[in-house]
Image: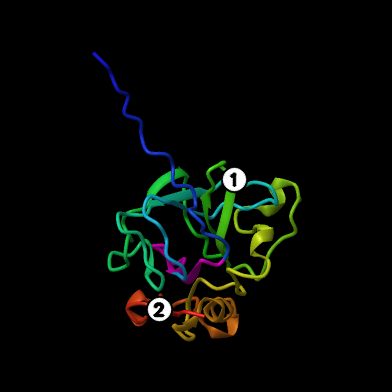
Amino acid sequence: MTSFTISSPPPVGCNGLGSGDVMVILVNSDNPDVVAFVALSDISEGIDLYMTDNAWTGSTFRMNEGTKKLIVPSGGIPAGTIFGYGQTDLSYGNDWVNAGGSFALSTSGDTVILYCLSDTNDYVHLAAFSSTGGWESPGLPEADYRTSNSALPSSLSSVGTTALGHVDNSKYDGDTFGTKEELQQAIGNSDYWSKSNSERFSISSFASSFTVEPV
């Protein structure tokens, strides 16, 4: 009798996702933590998205803070979708699982980096956000990044990044329609963000989705 072995499907990897295909559009670091993203490209089902407040050192992540993981559900996440972590009325807000350490944003300023892992297990950085005023140089002794600062992944040096001065809570308030490149530039411009050390921002103040226009 012939026997067959049924193997698990291969990992999806990042399936073509790259820098700036997702961007951060809201961060509340006053408890409870909330981080919202917008997909600027379609995200395939089965991809593992990782969100971390660990510092990037220039070659790897420190492991003194925390990482959350979202497995993109069946059907994927279409371009224009607003989703994120920590709020019940935010798509997939309660679907992130712990992937190591303790994810907890500091009200003294912090960084958030979103990434996936390629088929060869390399980091593919998708988006980065800082409320510390900017980014540290890569290659410093790990302790110099402390618990709030990070180097900026080199692949995000021109796209996918927003850096604000120290603020507890912040929300993108610019256009929600445009080409991917136009939205990347707008979201990355700190002039288009509302900021507060006392007021939390709600995802309900956004339109239901962004409109990513074809080029």
Residue 23 in the magenta stretch? The answer is: yes
Label 1, secondary structure: give it.
loop
Name above or below for residue 83 compared with residue 65: below
Q: How is the image coloured?
A: rainbow
58, 194: nearer the viewer: 58
* Left or right relative to 153: residue 49: left
Q: For residue 145, say whether it is visible.
A: yes
- What residue is shown at x 44% (from left), y 44% (from top)? 99
Q: Quadrant of the N terminus?
A: top left
Q: Residue at x 57, y 53 (%)?
A: 124
| Number of numbered labels in the structure image | 2
Q: Magenta span has 126?
A: no
Q: Which residue is mark 1?
A: 122
Task: Pick the residue in front: 167 or 187.
Answer: 187
Q: Who's the residue at 32% across and 67% down the image? A: 90
Residue 27 percent location from the top left of the image? 47, 69
Q: Amino acid at mark 1?
A: Asp
Badge 2, how many Cα within 10 Å: few under 14, some, many 20+?
Answer: some
Return the residue at label 2. 210
**Residue 111 visible in the picture:** no
Q: Position of residue 108 (x, y in %)?
A: 57, 65
Q: Position of residue 92 (x, y in %)?
A: 32, 60
Part of the protein shown in magenta: 20-38
Residue 192, x across and y down, in percent:
54, 84
Task: Indicate the amino acid at tag 2.
Answer: Phe
Residue toward you, 14 or 100:
14
- In the displayed structure, 4 sits above or below 123; it is above
